[in-house]
Amino acid sequence: MDIDKAIKVVKEYGRILKEKPIKNVQGRLMSLLPHDKDTIKEAIKVELIYAGTAEPRDEKMIRTLKLAFLQLASFLPDDEVVPPFDVDDALDSDDVCHSYYKYLGDSEIASNHILEQTSVLVEELDGFCQENGL
C-alpha cells in the first residue's frame, strides 16, 4: 500500500475512533469500520514506517498509531457488542437482578474477547516494530 492510500485509510479510521470513543469494555460495532481490519492494520504499519523514518522522528504520531492499531481489538462483530446498560429498562423489568447479572455476563465475554485480541495485536505490533527499528 502506498503512503497516500495509507494516510487516507488511517484518517477514515481515526474519524471513527474520535466519533465513537470507547468508554467501556463492551466493544464497538465492527460495521462502523471504514475498511476491514487487515487493510487498516496494513495502513497503520505503512504510516508507522513513514513516521519512524521521518526527520525529525514524530514520537507522538508513532504512539498514536500504535494505540490506534491496538484499538482494532475493540471492534467486535455487531451481534457480540454489548449495548449500554439501561437503568430505566432494568427498573421496568420484572427481574432487575437477573437483568443486571446477564448484562455483566455479556460484558465479561466481550471484554475477554477484546483482551485476547489485544494480546494478539500487541505481539504482531511488537514484532513489526522490532523488524523495522521502531
Image (cartoon, rainbow, N blue to C red):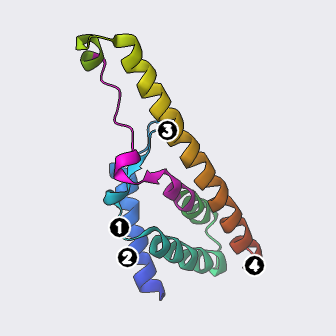
Question: Badge 4: few (under 14), some or many (20 or more) residues near its Cα, within 10 Å?
Answer: few
Q: What element carries label 4?
A: helix
Residue 112 location in percent, x, y? Answer: 58, 42
Callout in the foreground (3, 1): 3
Above/below status of 96 relative to 70: above
Task: Give me the residue at 49% from left, 38% from top.
Answer: 25
| Left or right: 122 in relation to 3 | right
Residue 98 location in percent, x, y? Answer: 40, 16
Label 1 vs 4, first from the N-terminus: 1
**Label 2 to label 1, Cα distance in Å?**
6 Å
Look at label 2 and name its amino acid: Lys
Above/below status of 123 relative to 76: below
> Is label 2 in contact with label 4 (beta carbons under 8 Å)?
no
**Start-end of magenta stretch:** 68-87
Label 3 vs 4, first from the N-terminus: 3
Q: What element carries label 1?
A: helix
Instruction: Inspect the magenta stretch and tell me whether residue 98 lies in it.
Output: no
Above/below status of 5 relative to 129: below
Which residue is disc 1 drawn over?
12
Look at label 3 and name its amino acid: Val
Label 2 vs 4, first from the N-terminus: 2
Which residue is disc 4 drawn over?
131
**Label 3 to label 1, Cα distance in Å?**
23 Å
Look at label 4 and name its amino acid: Glu
Q: What element carries label 2?
A: helix
Which residue is disc 2 drawn over?
8
Which residue is disc 3 drawn over?
25
Q: Which of 89 and 55 is in front in this view?
A: 89
Above/below status of 11 relative to 117: below
